[in-house]
Image (cartoon, coloured by chain):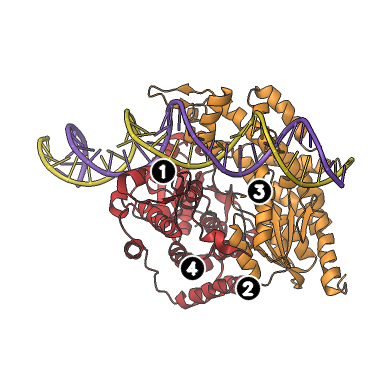
Chain colours: A red, B orange, C purple, D yellow
Amino acid sequence: MNFEEHVLPMRIADVERDTGISKDTLRVWERRYQFPKPQRDSLGERLYSQDQVERLRVIRRLLDQGMRPNQVLGMDLSELHLLLDAHSSQPTDTSRHATCLSLVRLLRTHCSRELRRSLNSILIKDGLQAFITQTIVPMSGIIGNDWIRGELTVPEEHLYTEQVQNVIRHAIHSQETEDVPPRILLTTFPEEGHCLGILMVEAMCVSEGAYCTSLGTSVPLPDIAKYAMDGKYDVVALSFSAAYPSRDVIKDLKQFRHILPEEISIWAGGAGLIQKRIHLPNLAVLTDIDGVPGLVRDWRQQFLGGQHD
Amino acid sequence: MNFEEHVLPMRIADVERDTGISKDTLRVWERRYQFPKPQRDSLGERLYSQDQVERLRVIRRLLDQGMRPNQVLGMDLSELHLLLDAHSSQPTDTSRHATCLSLVRLLRTHCSRELRRSLNSILIKDGLQAFITQTIVPMSGIIGNDWIRGELTVPEEHLYTEQVQNVIRHAIHSQETEDVPPRILLTTFPEEGHCLGILMVEAMCVSEGAYCTSLGTSVPLPDIAKYAMDGKYDVVALSFSAAYPSRDVIKDLKQFRHILPEEISIWAGGAGLIQKRIHLPNLAVLTDIDGVPGLVRDWRQQFLGGQHD
DNA sequence: AAGTTCATTTGTCTTGGACAAAGTGTTGAC
DNA sequence: GTCAACACTTTGTCCAAGACAAATGAACTT
């Protein structure tokens, strides 16, 4: 029953795993910016304090949003949080906001069964598409903000993902499949482990009657391209969470557009590419998941002459 | 349409990501065992060939099964494969073996829809528990063997996970919940990302009427313990895939037993702890998922006096 | 506005040495 | 035959300071 492991100083490898910042980078930051300057054990090895790791987590997040290291590496925790608040997207205050908050409360009190039941009844009342756009999306926003602020534990965050996954997968699976084109392949790039994004998109597309195949997360670029070509897919849909390294998004998408035949459309969306302007042939960037049904209809208009509108 | 990225030499960071072997280890192996001895670019930086990475992948697998580096680091690919064959578990040749093979064939030909349909009809015919023990478990064994031999692509492996997940989650979700004790918390330790294991166990337990909560994969030890205590769970069920570092299993389980009150049972299972004898108080090690229903009944016998047998 | 150039910032890779933690094997006692 | 204690070997992780290319930002011209 010893919980002190938690507050005990962490070794550099643990910090790397926890923050996603490489050992090399941690050492070079210490050399250049005098932060983080961890204590040393009897052998001269670094021991990072809980506070330092906390700050590093926030710093990582700010870097992902486009800040530069020399701007943020001197700050203490309160300054960092101020910056974070400035950057965090304001929740669009809909009529469902209260509902979302009460769902989050269920999560906080670990009422997993009630959470799933509530989600389910909202799904049945609103229908799949409205359920996602009006409940899941704003809720994920709230959860994401709480998460980076450390107000949510790991199990709580995971429990949320699990329950939402259960409900949406069940809904998709229950759908009568029409299999009207386009054929859509859903996945994420390597290092991107968040599965809710593609799951939501899949739900939206299936609701429109499209043929969807999900490969889950973290698939190498050439593998995606090969699979899409072999299976004669019309669209590859990709999701980027806010955790996706900001500087890699454009580079990776360019490379992918290069190896994927131009006839195949790319739909990219997610918090990882807000405020990014990417111009590539046959690429659609979605700022909002609301736009997915429109994309499906536009595709049909263009390639099927619109008889399925 | 340039697929050559694939066969181009890889940088050390890529190899680390692909094989799970750290940069430091790769460099020290090169120093000590003269393997892998990659080419260098114009700046003297390491460039690993496809063959070397392939060998490293197999080596990683053999190390996970308990081999030592000095035994395997001199071998070429064919020798490594021989060793691998010796270690790979023989599939118990049941009457379902042919069915499994035909399912794998569907996977290989990328017939995702047919695969799901077939799985579903077997599920309905056999019932959830038999479906898992007689179809999913042997099939996962086949897939696992193919996977380490490189006979399966990333998308194929992911597709399998996705479809099985869909079917099992749907089944669990459809179950009428009885909520008879024990209360079971399901999850995996950090670094363990395979979700099918706990999902199968959850299905077995839900079929027995137990109250199950799944936290998904990769939860830190203290977080699991705290959640289990707060939620008054009776059992924590953990899954270890073959990819879990063999040398860490016992250490991690010991540490976890230490921070979790002894009244709470630990059930541990999965390919990651075959042929391991671990003796800890109130810990059950499952070599086979068939044993799960028995564990549930034993627990009830012991704590409820068996009136729910 | 949209390029072009130049200086600065930043992350990744290099080397060889050091050392603890884990594994192996031998011995001796029960 | 099983177990504990011991020494010996193997093995992964960490350290330091230097190097350099790729990305970024600023100042400039078109």
> Chain ID for label 3?
B
> Chain ID for label 2?
A
Query: Real-space Cα distance between discs 2 and 3?
Result: 26 Å
User: Dot 1 corresponds to which residue?
Assistant: A282
- In the rendered structure, which amino acid carries the disc numbered 2? Arg
User: Dot 3 corresponds to which residue?
Assistant: B161
Q: Do labels 4 and 3 share a chain?
A: no
Query: Real-space Cα distance between discs 4 and 3?
Result: 27 Å
- In the rendered structure, find residue B85 and report the number of the disc placed on it: none
> Chain ID for label 4?
A
Residue nearest the observer in this picture, A99 or B281: B281
Pointer 4 with pointer 2, Cβ within 8 A: no
Q: Nearer the viewer, mark 1 or mark 2?
A: 2
- In the rendered structure, which amino acid carries the disc numbered 3? Thr
- In the rendered structure, which amino acid carries the disc numbered 1? Asn
- In the rendered structure, which amino acid carries the disc numbered 4? Met
Q: Are marks 1 and 3 on the same chain?
A: no
Q: Which of marks 1 and 2 is nearer the N terminus?
A: 2
User: Dot 4 corresponds to which residue?
Assistant: A139
Residue nearest the observer in this picture, A294 or A161: A161
User: Dot 2 corresponds to which residue?
Assistant: A117
